[in-house]
Image: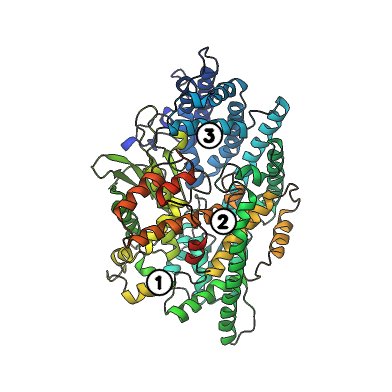
């Protein structure tokens, strides 16, 4: 970056903070715009240097130079998108609406550059003669295919139209996510009459009190649309009218009319995606997206989802009958509605297994679950974690750990941002400030997890549900995929793998949470310090597949609607009607809704990440169920030989090889869905 531009704050691109982090105290929101402009210009200059050289294309002067271009842009982008998701405000959101389409236009200008593609194409055509190692060959193939899928072979008119589409989609995706975040942040149900809290355990009341205080209502308890509050409220509140009111608000995010309504955005996005796919020679957007995955085709996805859907509906019907029995037994005559399911499912769990979430939660302290995550990583992979205090980050709640290899050498950094706040989008995710690679020296990974757990009152521990603890393990599995990465090229580092393989390391890691040796050590009552009684532990394990029909219907309906939107060559004009029609054709149970309804389906419409790809959680689940079974078959879920293979072929390999080849190298064969269906209790 040029030193002749004093208005550019280089703290965004030259990271001088502790442990190699950015110095988060050295820049503010107003610095991003100028830094982006300079970094975008610098990236284009790097590309021009590649394009304008007279030497024949080589791996060194073309592929490597392309991979190493735009370092300043990588750094300012990493900080900005972290802020946009984890700690946003009106200034960041306004800039996001500008930056998203600008970044899209910038990417199109590079990926459609005919001279740059000609150099990559030349290398690709002679790749068998270059004596490339497997990883470099894989990067070359992925790079070439990326150019083609980005329109490099289109005529000038096609390129211009595709660039326009991509830019518009980027704008719409940013607006979609901001609308959902605003609906979630703005809605709260304040309760001032304590009798209306009937049925709510202390941990729910405490979370609601904290949420009310954050909204300047210390006189009240607040139901919010954060999953960490709304779900336990729906599970325990005896007040059916408040359950209904809260549930309807939760289900209607992004569909409330006015400026935050996402209906028209979805309609336009689906239409533009179909046009994009057609421009690139595909019958549908799903065909385009799946061409670069393990599944390959929409048919392969449906072959997985449809049999599971039928089993899930049958199981959910049995569960609904059981819930209806409880309702009738209370002398009530209403049918099971969506705002009733969680409430009566908790009662049924208590009846069937003699425990409910309220009894379990005191044993699942956030601090202990984090320790359990680290312990499993140490047992499997030999890495250790040391927390560092007093390091400035993007928010005071964020924690920092140094990660070390078994020999004591530095592995990387891990940061955790665990608590819900109004400035954070909902959900949980992993990302990287810096990815591991060795292309121009050793680059240590800087990986972070973001969660949305309810923040406890001061001095009290944060208590998690079992689902919350699984979420923490899940995202830490993603984090390990980044931390354990051991590749040369940044293009295949860490989670840079096909979408339906990326969930394998995360979902597989969840299995170790409920290993008895881990629960016995870390499931400690926050008041008494006593370990979870074996009787309760046995009940938890026995209830592992409780409510399986409900959970699978929630998920699979979302995946099927996602595919329906994107597998048809004629996208719908009215997405809400299309959602309803699709669910009716699927014979969706009336008492259950999609886990993510269309107007707030951020996986699919806030950007392009999981569009025509939500199925990938279940695709990866087929792999993770089989992979954990491999450990169980040895009689030792920490088997060192198998853990070494797991690290080598799954957690460290990134996208350096075809995912199917990697899985076979670990397991010896590809799995069938049987283990997954068994694991789900279907």
Residue 211 visible: yes
Residue picked out by circle 2: 184
Q: Which residue is mark 3?
A: 142
| Whole-number angstrom distance, CA of label 2 to CA of label 1 | 32 Å
Mark 1: secondary structure = helix
Q: Mark on residue 540?
A: 1
Q: Which mark is drawn over residue 571?
A: none
Residue 149 at what x, y percent from top left? 62, 35
- For disc 1, the neighbor class at 10 Å (few under 14, some 14 to 19, many from 20) is many
Q: Nearer the viewer, mark 2 or mark 1?
A: 1
SS at circle 3 = helix
Residue ID at (43%, 38%): 493
First in sequence, mark 2 or 1: give its number: 2
Residue closest to the far left: 407
In the rendered image, residue 208, in percent from the top left (x then y), is placed at 47, 65
Residue 51, compared with residue 250, is above or below; it is: above
| Alpha-carbon span between mark 3 and mark 2 | 38 Å
């Amino acid at each position: 970056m040029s030193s002749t531009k004093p208005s550019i704050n280089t703290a965004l691109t030259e990271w001088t903070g502790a442990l190699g982090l950015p110095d988060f105290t050295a820049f503010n929101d107003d610095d991003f715009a100028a830094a982006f402009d300079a970094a975008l210009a610098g990236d284009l200059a790097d590309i021009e240097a590649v394009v304008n050289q007279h030497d024949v294309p080589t791996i060194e002067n073309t592929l490597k130079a392309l991979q190493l271009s735009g370092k300043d842009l990588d750094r300012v982008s990493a900080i900005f998108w972290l802020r946009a998701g984890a700690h946003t405000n009106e200034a960041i959101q306004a800039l996001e609406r500008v930056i998203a389409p600008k970044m899209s236009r910038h990417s199109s200008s590079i990926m459609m550059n005919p001279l740059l593609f000609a150099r990559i194409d030349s290398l690709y055509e002679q790749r068998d003669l270059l004596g490339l190692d497997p990883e470099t060959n894989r990067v070359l193939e992925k790079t070439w295919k990326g150019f083609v899928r980005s329109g490099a072979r289109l005529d000038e008119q096609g390129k211009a139209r595709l660039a326009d589409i991509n830019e518009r989609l980027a704008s719409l995706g940013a607006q979609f996510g901001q609308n959902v975040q605003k609906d979630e942040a703005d809605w709260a149900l304040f309760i001032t009459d304590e009798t209306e809290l009937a049925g709510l355990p202390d941990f729910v009341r405490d979370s609601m009190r904290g949420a009310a205080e954050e909204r300047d209502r210390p006189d009240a308890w607040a139901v919010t649309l954060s999953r960490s509050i709304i779900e336990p409220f729906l599970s325990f509140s005896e007040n059916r009218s408040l359950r209904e009111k809260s549930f309807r608000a939760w289900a209607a995010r992004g569909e409330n009319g006015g400026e935050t309504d996402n209906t028209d955005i979805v309609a336009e996005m689906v239409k533009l995606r179909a046009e994009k796919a057609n421009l690139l020679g595909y019958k549908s957007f799903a065909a385009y997206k799946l061409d670069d995955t393990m599944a390959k085709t929409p048919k392969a996805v449906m072959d997985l989802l449809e049999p599971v859907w039928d089993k899930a509906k049958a199981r959910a019907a049995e569960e609904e009958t059981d819930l209806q029995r409880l309702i009738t037994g209370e002398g009530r005559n209403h049918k099971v509605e969506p705002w009733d399911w969680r409430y009566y499912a908790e009662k049924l769990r208590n009846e069937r297994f003699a425990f409910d979430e309220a009894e379990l939660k005191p044993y699942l302290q956030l601090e202990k679950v984090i320790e359990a995550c680290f312990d499993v990583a140490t047992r499997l992979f030999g890495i250790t974690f040391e927390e560092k205090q007093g390091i400035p980050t993007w928010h005071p709640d964020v924690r920092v750990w140094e990660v070390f290899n078994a020999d004591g050498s530095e592995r990387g950094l891990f940061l955790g941002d665990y608590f819900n706040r109004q400035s954070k989008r909902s959900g949980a995710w992993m990302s990287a400030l810096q990815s591991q690679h060795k292309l121009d020296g050793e680059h240590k990974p800087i990986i972070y997890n973001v969660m949305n757990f309810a923040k406890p009152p001061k001095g009290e521990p944060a208590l998690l549900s079992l689902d919350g603890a699984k979420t923490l393990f899940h995202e830490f599995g993603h984090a390990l995929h980044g931390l354990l990465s051991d590749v040369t090229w940044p293009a295949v580092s860490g989670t840079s793998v096909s979408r339906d393989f990326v969930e394998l390391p995360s979902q597989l890691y969840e299995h170790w949470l409920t290993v008895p040796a881990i629960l016995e050590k870390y499931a400690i009552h926050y008041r008494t310090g006593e370990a979870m009684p074996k009787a309760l532990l046995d009940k938890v394990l026995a209830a592992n597949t409780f409510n399986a029909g409900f959970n699978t219907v929630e998920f699979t309906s979302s995946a099927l609607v996602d595919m329906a939107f994107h597998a048809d060559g004629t996208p719908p004009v009215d997405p809400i009607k299309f959602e309803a029609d699709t669910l009716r054709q699927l014979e969706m149970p009336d008492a259950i809704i999609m886990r993510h309804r269309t107007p707030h389906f951020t996986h699919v419409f806030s950007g392009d990440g999981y569009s025509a790809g939500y199925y990938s959680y279940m695709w990866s689940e087929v792999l993770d169920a089989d992979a954990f079974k491999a450990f169980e078959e040895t009689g030792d879920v920490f088997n060192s030989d198998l853990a070494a293979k797991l690290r080598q072929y799954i957690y460290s390999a990134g996208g350096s090889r075809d995912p199917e080849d990697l899985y076979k190298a670990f397991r010896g064969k590809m799995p069938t869905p049987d283990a997954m269906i068994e694991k789900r209790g279907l």
